[in-house]
Amino acid sequence: MASRPAGSSLKGSAMTKFWNRLSLSKRISFTFWVLCLIGGLALAGFALRSAF
């Protein structure tokens, strides 16, 4: 995180502001959906790899 390029620091602060503006329930549901998406993609990739 310390070795970021200079351009991404602005994006990082914008994301932090956006994240802080979210309520706790929105944060939980957002994290839940992101985890579900990652898990689904991982399962799909695993199924494709074992199928072929």
Image (spheres, rainbow, N blue to C red):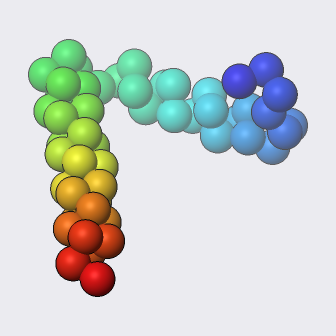
Q: Quadrant of the N terminus?
A: top right
41 shown above or below 12: below
In the image, residue 5 above or below residue 39? above
From this viewpoint, is residue 14 visible? yes
- Residue 13: give x, y in percent of width and height: 62, 28
Tell me which residue sits at (83%, 28%) in the image: 3
Residue 6: % across, % down: 86, 37
Is 2 or 40 nearer to us in this picture? 40
Q: Quadrant of residue 11?
A: top right
Residue 17 percent across, percent down from the top left? 49, 25
Can residue 30 be seen by looking at this rendering?
A: no
At x 29%, y 49%, the residue is 38
**Left/right of residue 36 with respect to residue 13 in the rendered view:** left
Relative side of 29 to 1, left or right: left
| Quadrant assignment for the C terminus | bottom left
Instruction: Locate residue 51: give its quadrant.
Output: bottom left
Counting the numbered discs, the total is 0
| Nearest to the observer: residue 11 or residue 46 | 46
- In the image: residue 2, left or right of residue 48: right
What is the quadrant of residue 23 in the picture? top left
The one of 46 and 29 positioned closer to us in this rendering: 46
Q: Which residue is pictured at 84% across the width and 39% down the height? A: 5
